Image (cartoon, rainbow, N blue to C red):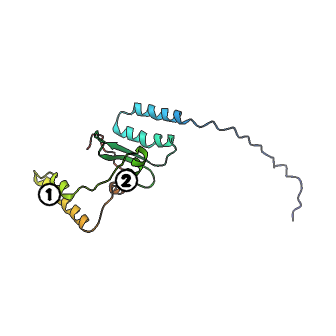
Amino acid sequence: MKKAGPPSPEWKPYLARVSPSPEPPSLSERLQTVTEALAAAHTEQKVFQTVLTPAPQALNAVDATVLLVDRAGRHLKVAATQGHEPLTLRQRAEIVSRVTGRSIEVQQIPLETVTAQMPRSTLIEAYGSDSLERMFTYCSRHGLTGSSNVLGWVQVQPPVPSLGAG
């Protein structure tokens, strides 16, 4: 057993000085940075990237959704999302309803209404419309309600739709 004694000559104590970390930017400074980034954005994709990355960070949020409302204020559309667990359209509507204080109701459009609007003037349109109608009928018959998240689940990168898309 080795006898305890003074430290060996190779041993030298170290004193670490930690400089104080700078103050984190204020909320208004962080939002100013987001505003500047939005002003510099020249494409829809850049706008969505700015809204879905720096803006939630400025607010210390972990999830973000860009929701577009039509001019009449009657229809809500999910334009882009980023976060951990995808939310259903009903969950998103509940959140927006809570935040805005307005009642938002998610409704299923009757199959007949959808199929009446499907294009059928060419063979390829008729084939595509017929295929969609059969798929919707099958899902309805077997209780498959679907999810607004499916497209995001099957794609490596979620789509960034055009702002002009209806």
Residue 90 picture location, percent across and down: 36, 55
Do we see residue 128 in this rendering?
no
Who's the residue at 26% across and 68% down the image?
Answer: 142
Instruction: Check if mark 2's residue and mark 1's residue have beta carbons within 8 Å.
Output: no
Disc 1: which residue = 127
Q: Amino acid at mark 1?
A: Tyr
Closest to the observer: 69 or 123?
Answer: 69
Q: Amino acid at mark 2?
A: Val
Who's the residue at 38% across and 41% down the image?
Answer: 48
User: Counting residues from the N terminus, which is met first, the one under dot 2 or under dot 1?
Assistant: 1
The quadrant in which the N terminus is found is: bottom right
Who's the residue at 85% across and 49% down the image?
Answer: 9
161 left or right of 100 in image = left
Residue 46 picture location, percent across and down: 38, 38
Residue 89 picture location, percent across and down: 35, 53
Res 56 label: none
In three-dimensional space, the C-alpha distance between marks 2 and 1, rounded to whole angstroms, equals 28 Å
Q: Tag 2, which secondary structure? A: loop
21 left or right of 48 in image = right
Vertical relation: 111 (above or below) 103:
below
When asked about the image quadrant of residue 162, the answer is top left
143 left or right of 132 in image = right
Q: Tag 1, which secondary structure? A: helix
Disc 2: which residue = 156
Do we see residue 149 in this rendering?
yes
Residue 159 picture location, percent across and down: 33, 48
Crowd band around label 1 with a 10 angstrom C-alpha radius: few (<14), some (14–19), many (20+) = few
